[in-house]
Amino acid sequence: MGDEPRDHDTGAEPFSRTARAEDARAEDVLALMRLAGGPGAVGAVLEWLARRTGGAAALVTGGGSVLAAAPSRPARDALLAVAELHRRGTPSGVRGTGPGRTVHMVALGGDPYLVLEGGADERYGALLTDTARLLELSLRAEEHKRAAYRMQKARARGREAVLHLLVGGSVALAHRVAGAMGDRLPGNLRVCVVESPARERVAAAARLERAAPGTAWIVPCPVRSRHLIALIPAGDRRWEQEALDEMPECRIGASGEVPLRDTALAYEQAFHALSVARGAPARWSRFSGHGDLAPLLGSEGARWATRLLRPCLAYEPARRSDPGAEELVDTLASWLTFKSGAGRHLKIHRNTLTARLRLVESLLGLDLLTGVAQQSAVWLALRLRTAHTPPTSGCPTDLPALLATPAAQTWARTLLGPLGPSGADTVCAWLRADTRLSEAAATLGISPPGLRKRLVRAEEALGRSLLHAPSCTYELWLALKALDRI
């Protein structure tokens, strides 16, 4: 009787094996799903599969290229087996490639193939099928992320190009380029410079876009790695506060509202306002300084500027490959604004930048690289060239005569007023030394660190960036020159 088969025994063991197999498959699928949704999904899944089977896993194209592998690349015979399978258009296969060694292959869609090198007696059909399906989804997700990143990168470069055009005064061309990108530029705007940790700038740009969807232009600064430049339509009063709420670690400097053609001026204002925002409890500041000098000098100023810049504007290169007049003027304007950062701004090598500046110096007959007086004069000339149309007749005046006008005198006294006598003396000594700290400190009988502290106090009094924004240096020199202080 003990030898008689029992019905319930004959069915129990196969059922138990089936249940255990289904449970194991469910656990494998759950593990794969967790990996497929995490960072570096493809590599993580291949590593898991290699550990799970004790073999080697890889993604191989039909042409034999290995896209990823764990723990090592497939052998050459495995690559040939994949190529043969792909040539025949077969979606899966198993091939013995040596004693005790088998290559399992499953296509992800049509290509690439999931390849597993394992033992000859092992069967991994269900496991490979499940892994291949999830890997295909992971590959599609990664490709989608790469495509989105490329699109984001192209859009950022397009916006940077538009910003370059606006700063250079090419407003009509900027409108056309923005229109080709599907964007519209406002007639009047404010510029905000947002400072955040450099490592978080990409994330910060995304947050700022969310703070003003469809209205603000967010452009990573091409020169300063911690800065984002935002073009905000005039009248939008919510943006800064929403951005500050979204980014508690940021600081924002905002310009006044200006026409689109004055984007360069608005950027300078926002940069100066940022120097105040760094020390403000609200983490935000709006530029509240005096007016610009260039509009006060009128057409006579434009005539003087044209005469000063004429050798550069009329320059014709001997070779077509050499920079022309427009490139030289753009290089000069960028260097006066960003100094050593001009190479990054213009996307040229520093040696190219130096060579162009040397050429401009020879054309204008000025010592630009070291002389603050010459830099200030050329900076003002560039501003006047874009602000006014010079008269067609009359004798050109000179810079001292322009600075002696009542409007320029009032402007100079207004600018220097917050410094007080001692602050003005400090700045004057610093500018006479062409901003060399050690030389100016020796003149004043103090140490260079002591002079730097005084200049920082001058920044606070002016509400402008003196040590990091050359435009303030030029304006102070012009103001002191107007009042015969330098």
Image: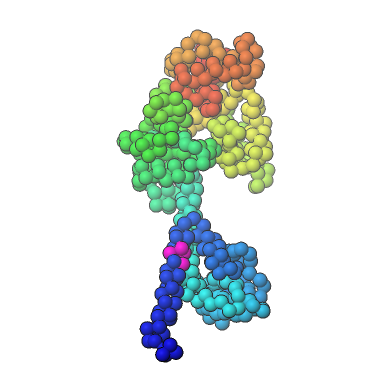
Q: Is residue 19 above or below residue 294?
A: below
- Image spot of residue 45 (x, y percent): 51, 63
Residue 401 visible in image: no
**Quadrant location, the C terminus:** top right
Q: Residue at x 59, y 32 (%)?
A: 339
Looking at this view, is 286 or 26 the one in front?
Answer: 26
Q: Residue at x 32, y 36 (%)?
A: 238
Quarter location, residue 282: top left
In the picture, measured across the screen, residue 456 lies left or right of residue 96, that is left
**Quadrant location, the N terminus:** bottom left
Q: Which residues are magenta?
A: 28-32
Q: Is residue 27 above or below residue 163?
A: below
Quarter location, residue 311: top right
- Image spot of residue 97 (x, y percent): 65, 78
Secondary structure character of the magenta stretch overall: helix
Residue 121 visible in image: yes
